[in-house]
Image: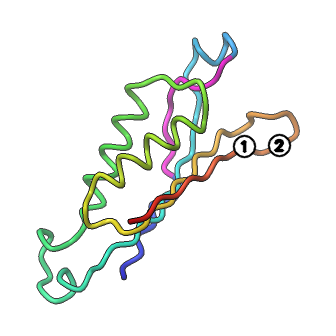
């Protein structure tokens, strides 16, 4: 089983429920863990036999930057859904951090996972 990690993908989006959050983009930090069987990719050494993490990352970027979210939970679930659309994925875990969401805290994060 191959383990793909997308680390610290920093994007800007509209997220939150306060007027300031609704009107101004904020940073979010995304981490993903994706497991898929890579036997064929290892054997054949061609991208058609691998899970294309670039395609997944582009879909995540597009979704985050083109939408608005009230809750971290909703954003995290939608990103998990994007990853799980790929039939090769056996397990995925998505963590979304919202830096400086609370006073005195570096960030607040939500993590959701899915498996088949």
What residue is drawn where x is 67% and y is 13%? 20
Residue 29 spot, x, y in % from top left: 56, 46
- The residue closer to the viewer here, 37 or 45, is 37
Q: Classify the position of the C terminus by image quarter.
A: bottom left
The one nearer the camera, 104 or 82, is 82
Query: Measured from the top left, where is residue 70 in percent x and y?
Result: 59, 24
**Residue depicted at x 66% and y 18%:** 17
Residue receiving disc 2 = 105
- Tag of residue 64: none
Q: CB under 8 Å between callouts 1 and 2?
A: yes
Separation of residues labelled 1 and 2 (CA atoms)? 7 Å
- Can you say whether 17 is above or below 110 in the image? above
Left or right: 10 with respect to 110? left
Region in magenta: 9-17
Give the side of residue 34 with respect to residue 25, left or right: left
Quarter of the image for the N terminus: give it.
bottom left
Image vertical order of residue 92 relative to residue 70, above or below: below
Q: For the view shown, which residue lies furthest in the right direction?
A: 104
Q: Residues within 10 Å of mark 1 (few under 14, many from 20)?
A: some
Q: Is residue 84 left or right of residue 30?
A: left
Quarter-of-image position of residue 115: bottom left
Asked whether, in this view, residue 70 is left or right of residue 89, the answer is right
Residue at 44%, 49% (x, y): give it.
80
Q: Residue furthest front?
A: 116
Magenta stretch, overall SS? strand
Q: Residue at x 63, y 23 (%)?
A: 16
Please tell me how crowded label 2 is: few (under 14), some (14-19), or many (20+) other residues with Cα within 10 Å. few
Q: Please give the label number shown on residue 108.
A: 1
């Amino acid at each position: 089983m191959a383990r793909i990690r997308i680390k610290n993908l920093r994007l800007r989006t509209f997220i939150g429920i306060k007027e300031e959050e609704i009107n101004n983009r904020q940073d979010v930090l995304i981490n993903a863990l994706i497991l898929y069987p890579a036997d064929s990719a290892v054997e054949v050494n061609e991208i058609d036999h691998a899970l294309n993490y670039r395609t997944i990352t582009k879909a995540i970027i597009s979704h985050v930057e083109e939408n608005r979210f009230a809750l971290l939970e909703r954003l995290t679930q939608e990103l998990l859904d994007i990853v799980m659309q790929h039939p090769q994925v056996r397990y995925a875990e998505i963590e979304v951090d919202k830096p400086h969401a609370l006073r005195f805290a570096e960030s607040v994060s939500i993590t959701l996972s899915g498996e088949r």
